[in-house]
Amino acid sequence: MEVIPAAAAAHDGQKQRFDLGVFVGDLPLDDDDAASDNESLEGLQQELEDCKNDQEVANILANGIKMRDYTKGVENSIRQVELDSIQDYITESENLVLLHDQISDCDNILSQMETVLTGFQTEIGSISSEIKVLQEKSMDMGLKLRNRKAAESKLSKFVEDIIVPPRMIDIIVDGEVNDEYMKTLEILSKKIKFIEADSMVKTSKALKDVQPEVERLRQKAVSKIFEFIIQKFYALRKPKTNIQILQQSVLKYKYTIVFLKEHAKEIYAEVRTAYIDTMNKVLSAHFRAYIQALEKLQLDIATSTDLLGVETRSTGYLFSIGKEPLKARSSVFALGERINVLKDIEQPALIPHISEAKSQKYPYEVLFRSLQKLLIDTATSEYLFSDDFFGEESLFQDIFAGPIQVVDEYFDAVLLNCYDAIGIMLMIRIIHQHQLIMFKRRIPCLDSYLDKVNMSLWPRFKMVFDLHLSSLRNANIKTLWEDDVHPHYVTRRYAEFTASLVHLNVEYGDGQLDLNLERLRMAIEDLLVKLAKMFPKPKMQTVFLINNYDLTIAILKEAGTEGGKTQLHFEEVLKSNIAIYVEEVLLEHFSDLIKFVKTRTSEDPASSSDKANIGDVEPLVKDFVNRWKAAIELMHKDVITSFSNFLCGMEILKAALTQLLLYYTRLTECVKRVNGGSALNKDLVSISSILYEIKKYSRTF
């Protein structure tokens, strides 16, 4: 049977196909196989389909080789390879026997090693069991050791806490109260606490032997501490004792107070009461003596009659000058050097006997600062000591109740008769500064006291201030009036008083005080206007007001740049009164000229030229040229004699001459517009001449 060549199949453009009938016809078939022929053909067809893509099968078929022949060839090749392999084994048989012997020897050696290792494993297992037993014994012994150590620790601590060494007994019973005694006292306190606090201790038999001894030691310690502390407290009562130094020396024994607090509360209460009573009496006596010494140094500044609007003669100054320095009287309304008390706020308190030996006297605010400084320093020291030694801040209030009462009684008595408004305001500022000092120290113990003093000072200041205000409002004009245009003494009082209060209010900005000063300003203005009306001539009235306003401004400026609204107001009224005076003084010398200028001239040249004629202006021109220099000289003399402030007077004269120049300029302009006015040109004074005179008087200053 022929197989269609691959080349022929490719030439025909068809895929190679295999004639299944050819292969089947060549195979011998039995009758039993006929039934399954179709299934075999289908299986064979499937296998051929699977092999048609195999490259080797394709090559075989392409070469035209029969599959049966190719299969036989393959079987022959395999058989030949098998024979060759057998020959190789035969050739290497000796080597294989040697290899077999070597493997057997190795197997024997490994068997022996296995036996040895098995023995080792058995021995290791035995050792591991022994180690576990030892480990269990070790853990058991460790546990027992820890338990015994814990028991020993507790037992030793118990013995240490409950036992009373002979040395401790000797120190507590016979020893002096010193550092060693303090340490021993701490040990005794721990033993007492241990016995009282630990419930197990109370059931121990050792307690029956030790407790009585501990109780006797406690009683002995309490007795000795009480006597020691009471003696220290009594030492504070000795005259001229430095309390602070003694307190500092007692501080190292403060554990005695802790011991009494914890183990003898009744005795502690007695010690506390004894200290309060001692310090209350000592400090009260100390402040009482200090106040008595300060009273000898007091310089009375003001009385109930030293008011702004009170007549000088009614105050009795003429008879009091011999008793009190004039300087003291000048301080009634002026701050002056009294401000230094605020600058010395941190200075120590006065030492009265030194000041008395020097015959020095002080305004009350200086004594007030000294007393309050001593009080806050003493209070600070006592507060810190009470807190440190007794551990009680509340103790201070009980101790200082007496001293504060002594100071309050003295202060209330002085304040009741105090009419020095400047001094009261200084005291208010002193209290404020002392409050800041205590705040910086973080000592609150005097907060309520300082607030109370401050609340007492303000109503008194308001009352005295209202007295000054009423004295201005209800002043007797007839008794106050003097036939003198120079500044009134009431104005000086007011200006100094206001400048003082304004200066003291700069850093505080008290709005209520500003309102009171505004009321006072209105009152003095009303009074000055009333006094001015007593002068018969308007010019004298204006001069009087100018002098008083100028003095007020000058004093406010001397006090600093803090004059504020008050100063600005007086500057405005001064300016308006100067303008009035200028008009009045010019009318006195050039009334016709001024009237003509005001009535016959206007801003419209055409309207004025029709009304004026040569006959109206000629007398004015000739009159002016004849006496203008003399009139200016008279004005100059008038200013010199009328105004107290030379510079102010010269400014007023300059303003008057400037206004005169303005009027005369308007007159010359009118002359030029009048028919025939050119004939008067020879009589007109040149503007440069008038300016020369103005500059001449200006150079005088």
Image (spheres, rainbow, N blue to C red):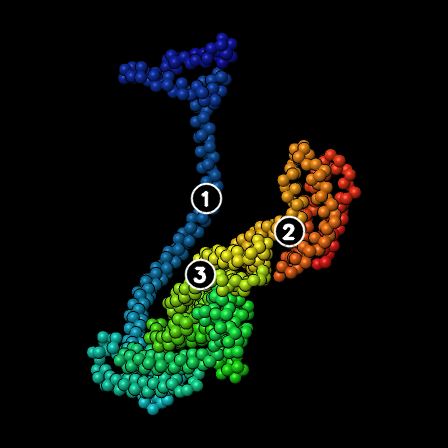
How far apart marks 1 and 3 lie (CA) works out to 158 Å
- As rendered, which of 305 and 266 lies closer to the eye? 305
At which x and y percent is residue 476? 47, 62
Sequence-wise, the earlier of marks 1 and 2 is: 1
Sequence-wise, the earlier of marks 1 and 3 is: 1
Q: Secondary structure at mark 2?
A: helix
- As rendered, which of 292 and 700 lies closer to the eye? 700
Q: Disc 2 residue type?
A: Glu
Which residue carries the number 1 mark?
Answer: 93
- As rendered, which of 42 and 265 lies closer to the eye? 265
Q: Quadrant of the C terminus?
A: bottom right
Sequence-wise, the earlier of marks 2 and 3 is: 3
Residue 229 is tagged as none
* Viewer-nearest of discs 1 and 2: 2
Which residue carries the number 2 mark?
Answer: 588
The answer to whether mark 1 and mark 3 are in CB contact below 8 A is no
Residue 259 shows up from this direction: no
Query: Quarter-wise, where is residue 124 in the image?
Result: bottom left
At which x and y percent is residue 440? 46, 67
How far apart marks 2 and 3 lie (CA) works out to 35 Å
Does residue 679 lie above or below 221 as drawn? Answer: above
Query: Quarter-wise, where is residue 543 in the image?
Result: bottom right
* Viewer-nearest of discs 1 and 3: 3
Q: Secondary structure at mark 1?
A: helix
Identify the residue at image location x=48%, y=43%: 92
Does residue 469 lie above or below 584 as drawn? Answer: below
Which residue carries the number 3 mark?
Answer: 474
